[in-house]
Image (tube, rainbow, N blue to C red):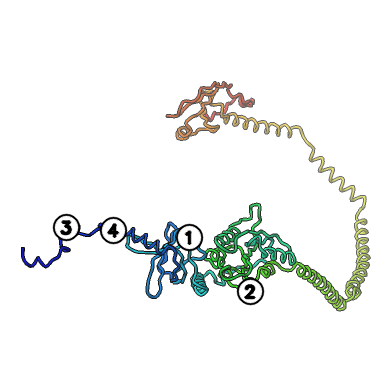
């Protein structure tokens, strides 16, 4: 062996061998990781850490993963789903908190971490910082915009109240409403503090907004979210994002009455109107009934005075117009004068007309003499003698009329449509009309042939055969043909022969 290999000690051996006096067996990585895990958990089984949240994320399983850091170090942390559901606030990056839990290791990454069982904000400053951060984010989304605010109804018939059913708040609201203007109140009982309060308040607001009014309960015209005063921790449920969004999305006008006059929550910014106290919210919700009745009475009095004043003014105007109008005697004097003139002229006209008529009567009476009457009667008798009827005139006139009648009768008989049927002709009918061409017969398809002794149905071309039906026999046309002596002696030529 070369001398250069002699400088190496036994640690440079290729194969591991037990050495004399070595009683520690080799540990696996998992065994060492388990030892470290137990050591850390036993030594740091309960710790409280103060730090700033960084890298916060919520897994789909509901577990929370984050890191707590200060100026010089960073420690990973995890909060399981059960503890996350009990948190009183929503963790965000940059918020300083105090976490309570135990240290453990994660062998899969050779890291140590804290399993957080409880997490709280590190003082009021951290709480206000979280509040301002959430307020700025929601304001940036427009949830606090003025144009989103809805006007409150003047006289709501039904008011929905979201509050605790056992506190003094609901009693103050009901008492104030009864004093001012009694109305229907629907109370949605919720927790107003502690774990799950924010979810219940948000669910109540959304429930009132989703009502359609067709069920057993009427839909509220106004909603009041109310809670008594308290510390910022007590009122924190009304700063939660779920409550703020529910209030902003509510389709019913809503009043926020959370805390006392100096208390302000994000719910106040999202509501349509903020009330300094729950009692003030009841005063905003309804007017004073006594004031309404007094106002109605005053308006009735004003209306009566207005009617009387209008009638008085109309009476004064009528009297003024009446003084300016002419009297009846003044209006009728021209007509009276014209009537007198017409009466005088009528008397004179009647007298003149009577004189003229008497003159005409005298003139006509003088013309009526017996000789003239006898002469007139004689002339009338002569005209009557000339107009006497003679038998030969009557015989000649009757003969002429008979000849003309025979001529018309023969012509009428020659035009009888059934006469050609006696000579073997047939008349073609289809649907009650006469068929006059081949095209019309083909278009009809089925025709009826009329003979002198009856009818026969026939099909044209490819038309389907007719249903068999009895043929109705009819006698030849028996229309009478007038004959005269001249017709017997000299028959007229037939137009159809």
Q: Nearer the viewer, residue 22 or 306?
A: 22
Residue depth check, mark 1 versus mark 3: number of the one nearer the observer: 3
Q: Which mark is residue 29?
A: 4
Q: Nearer the viewer, residue 266 or 181?
A: 266
Q: Earlier in the sequence, mark 1 or mark 4?
A: 4
Could you tell me which secondary element the residue under label 4 belongs to?
helix
Q: Earlier in the sequence, mark 4 or mark 2?
A: 4
Q: Residues within 10 Å of mark 2 (few under 14, many from 20)?
A: few
Q: Are marks 2 and 3 in contact (CB under 8 Å)?
A: no
Residue depth check, mark 3 versus mark 4: number of the one nearer the observer: 3
- The residue indicated by pointer 3 is 15
Q: Which mark is residue 261?
A: 2
Residue 164 placement (x, y as % from top left): 63, 61
Residue depth check, mark 1 versus mark 2: number of the one nearer the observer: 1
| CA–CA distance in space, label 1 to label 3 | 51 Å
Q: Nearer the viewer, residue 154 or 428?
A: 154
Q: Residue at x 84, y 43 (%)?
A: 381
Q: Earlier in the sequence, mark 1 or mark 3?
A: 3
Residue depth check, mark 2 versus mark 3: number of the one nearer the observer: 3
497 sits left or right of 188 in the view: left
- The residue indicated by pointer 1 is 83
Could you tell me which secondary element the residue under label 2 belongs to?
loop
| CA–CA distance in space, label 4 to label 2 | 63 Å
Q: Earlier in the sequence, mark 1 or mark 2?
A: 1
Could you tell me which secondary element the residue under label 1 belongs to?
helix
Could you tell me which secondary element the residue under label 3 belongs to?
loop
Residue depth check, mark 1 versus mark 4: number of the one nearer the observer: 4
| CA–CA distance in space, label 3 to label 4 | 19 Å
Residue 234 placement (x, y as % from top left): 58, 67
């Amino acid at each position: 062996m070369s001398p250069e290999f002699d400088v190496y000690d036994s640690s440079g051996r290729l194969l591991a061998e037990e050495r004399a006096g070595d009683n520690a067996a080799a540990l696996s990585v998992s065994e060492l990781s388990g030892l470290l895990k137990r050591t850390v958990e036993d030594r740091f089984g309960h710790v409280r850490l103060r730090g700033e949240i960084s890298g916060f994320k919520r897994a789909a399983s509901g577990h929370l993963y984050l890191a707590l850091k200060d100026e010089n170090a960073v420690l990973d942390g995890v909060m399981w789903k059960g503890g996350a559901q009990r948190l009183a606030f929503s963790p965000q990056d940059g918020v300083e908190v105090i976490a309570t839990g135990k240290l453990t290791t994660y062998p899969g990454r050779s890291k140590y971490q804290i399993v957080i069982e409880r997490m709280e904000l590190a003082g009021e400053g951290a709480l206000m910082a979280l509040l301002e951060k959430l307020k700025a984010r929601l304001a940036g989304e427009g949830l606090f915009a003025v144009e989103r605010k809805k006007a409150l109804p003047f006289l709501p018939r039904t008011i929905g109240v979201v509050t605790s059913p056992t506190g003094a708040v609901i009693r103050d609201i009901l008492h104030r409403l009864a004093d001012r203007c009694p109305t229907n109140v629907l109370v949605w009982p919720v927790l107003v503090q502690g774990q799950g309060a924010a979810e219940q308040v948000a669910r109540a607001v959304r429930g009132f907004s989703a009502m359609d009014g067709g069920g057993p309960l009427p839909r509220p015209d106004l909603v009041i979210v109310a809670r008594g005063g308290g510390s910022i921790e007590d009122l924190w449920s009304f700063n939660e994002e779920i409550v703020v969004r529910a209030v902003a999305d509510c389709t019913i006008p809503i009043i926020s009455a959370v805390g006392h006059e100096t208390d302000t929550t994000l719910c106040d910014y999202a509501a349509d109107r903020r009330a300094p106290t729950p009692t003030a919210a009841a005063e905003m919700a309804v007017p004073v009934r006594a004031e309404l009745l007094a106002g109605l009475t005053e308006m009735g009095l004003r209306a009566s005075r207005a009617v009387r004043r209008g009638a008085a003014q109309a009476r004064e105007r009528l009297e003024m117009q009446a003084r300016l109008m002419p009297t009846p005697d003044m209006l009728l004097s021209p007509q009276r004068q014209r009537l007198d003139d017409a009466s005088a002229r009528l008397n004179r006209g009647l007298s003149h007309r009577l004189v003229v008529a008497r003159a005409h009567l005298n003139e006509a009476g003088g013309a009526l003499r017996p000789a003239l009457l006898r002469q007139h009667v004689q002339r009338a008798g002569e005209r009557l003698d000339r107009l006497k009827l003679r038998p030969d005139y009557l015989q000649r006139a009757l003969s002429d009329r008979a000849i003309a009648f025979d001529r018309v009768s023969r012509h009428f008989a020659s035009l009888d449509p059934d006469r050609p049927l006696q000579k073997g002709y047939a008349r073609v009918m289809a649907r009650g009309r006469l068929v006059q061409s081949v095209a019309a017969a083909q278009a009809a398809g089925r025709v009826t042939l009329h003979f002198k002794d009856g009818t026969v149905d026939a099909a044209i071309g490819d038309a389907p055969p007719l249903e068999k039906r009895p043929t109705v026999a009819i006698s030849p046309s028996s229309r009478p043909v007038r004959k005269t002596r001249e017709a017997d002696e000299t028959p007229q030529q037939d137009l159809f022969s």
